[in-house]
Image (cartoon, helix red, strand yellow):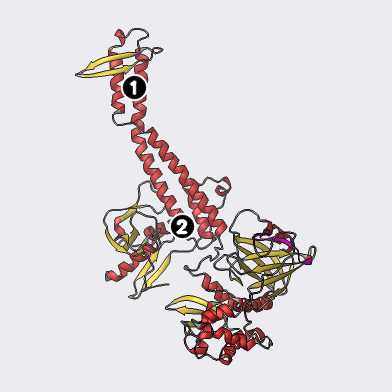
Amino acid sequence: MHFDALTLACITAELKQTLCPGRIQQVTPVDEHALGFEVYAGGARHPLLVALHPNSARVHTVSYKLRRGVEGETPLLLLLRKYARGALLSDVVQPDPVERVLHLHFEHPEHGTTSLIVELIGRQPNAVLVGPGGRILEALRRVRAGEGERTLSPGHLYAPPPAPAKLPPLDDGAEDYYDRLAQVIAQPGPLWKALVAGVAGLSPTAAREIAFRVTGNAGASSEGVTVIALAQALQELWSPLQTGDWQPGLIEDEGWIGGFAPYPVQFRGRFLPQPSMSEALERFFAQPTATHAPDAYAALRSQVLAQVKRAQAQVERRLAALAGDAPAPGEVERLRTQASWLLAFSGQIAPGQTLLTVDAGGETLHIPLEPHLSPIEQAQRLFKRAAKLERAAEIIPQRRAQLLADLDLLAQLALDAERAANQPELAAVLDELRRAGLLSSPKARATQTAPAAGGPLRYRTSRGVEIVVGRNARQNEQVTFKLARPSDLWLHVRGAPGAHVVVRSSEQAPAEEDVLAAAQLAAYHSNQRGERKVDVIVTERRWVSRAPGGRTGQVVVSKERVVRVPAVEPEDVSAV
């Protein structure tokens, strides 16, 4: 979907009204391509997102707090904190209404006037901080002399992007304006493509809308289209620049949000009006299918996942070391046999002898001797080594089982961290690591007990059956051993981390459709999400028990059946 010049014009009008004048309180690196500003205006804090991702560049306010998503400090970030933080956002300007360039003007009490020029154009959107006299202080993406059409490096004068050689969408008073508009119509092919190629400021979405309003068909050719009809359609679409009558909204296609626009779209889907362009953009880019939706907890999530990965690496090293300590098959018996023969022949071994050869019932044994030890001393050492290996043979399987349980817990905690929706849920992951003795960071170890992270998810099928879903290891424990009754159905993805799911029992057994819906929820809330076929265990809760010596949420199942379902959200359930 295109964040075009008209969308930017609508956003500019919103920002002028909402943020100007406003005080910049924070500047945050949301990710490597996005900046966040906290602007205090009108008695409220407004998070402003400047996203410069190659495929989804945009500027708009959001309803959530923007958080740091990357470590380190870039030159642009450091300068913005100097010149913008504490400054007054005095104005927001779109210098050319047909171009996707926005100027944010700052007035700092100590450092004076600067401007952040946001260029939402091309394959490399950019942000350029410009000081007095129009000289560049820094840029998100520097362009050195000879690397592009313009030089965007500190110390150089800022030059705006070159204007496209296209016809303006509104009559500019030129004598040949309508002649040139007629030339646009005369181009072969679909009308909308001719409009994109010949008229400035038009995205494919806007061009298709104009084609539809003129011909009734977004994909129609320009055959039969009059210059007057086209000019009227352009005037209608661009009139909010003068009137301020913006009508932002979303485009719904077959149940999903397929686009946005600052005007009612007629050629496609159903247009859903929104309170503001910013709200429309936030809702569109918050979809799972939308690219580069900012993660408000990216920095904390990254730190938690790093702790989990460190713990996984440590457990895997311990498992590898354990494998090296395990005695080879028959090693204990071999050592004891050698020790026994050494005792039996101790009186016949000459001083300095290095090998004892024994005929042991048809088998020839070659026992190395250590000249500096007596045969009895060497036999005692062999018996001691055999006893140690025998103890290891008993302890190592138990230790290996515990380490494997730790790896299973860490796989679950990694999934919990990836899916966590808020700070308490991320803190719960660290708390579980600490309780399991797997947290390697001393600073994190000192953290207080995690705050409550909300309860399990609850759904109801179209037939009224309640389904409860644990969202993390601790909630899995709660769902299975506190909320579920013995007769409730219990579900979990086979052989993978994921949610414990319970289907609440009633007088009648749940229909198979409800069981399959619960199985889909179990698959969806696992690390198999998106797979077409996932095996899910189904049993009664009475057949589920805690794994002996296991970690939080780890169980054993004594009776089960398996259903195979897609790992997508079922259609016939609703959250309650």
Q: Which mark is residue 416?
A: 2
Q: Secondary structure at mark 1?
A: helix
Q: In the rendered structure, which disc, 1 or 2, sits on the residue that comes first in sequence?
A: 1
- Residue 39, given in percent of the width and then of the height, sits at 68, 69
Q: Is residue 100 left or right of residue 86?
A: left
Using a 10 Å C-alpha cutoff, classify the residue at mark 2 as few (fewer than 14 neighbours), some (14 to 19) or many (20 or more).
many
**Relative to 562, is 290 above or below?**
below
Name the residue at 33% across, 56% down.
Answer: 494
- Residue 213, given in percent of the width and then of the height, sits at 52, 88
Q: Secondary structure at mark 2?
A: helix
Using a 10 Å C-alpha cutoff, classify the residue at mark 1 as few (fewer than 14 neighbours), some (14 to 19) or many (20 or more).
some
Is residue 242 visible in the rendered structure shown here?
A: yes
Given residues 135 and 422, the one toward you in this image is 135
Q: Is residue 369 left or right of residue 251?
A: left
Q: Is residue 170 left or right of residue 454?
A: right
Identity, as a three-letter code, of the amino acid under mark 2? Asp
**Relative to 362, is 256 above or below?**
below
Provide the residue designation for mark 1. Answer: 383
- Residue 121, given in percent of the width and then of the height, sits at 61, 69
Q: Quadrant of the C terminus?
A: bottom left
- Residue 477, given in percent of the width and then of the height, sits at 40, 56
Identity, as a three-letter code, of the amino acid under mark 1? Phe
Residue range of the region highlighted in magenta in the rendering? 133-146
Name the residue at 44% across, 50% down.
Answer: 410
**Residue 301 lies in the magenta-colored region:** no
Q: CA distance from mark 1 to mark 2?
A: 49 Å
**Relative to 390, is 470 above or below?**
below
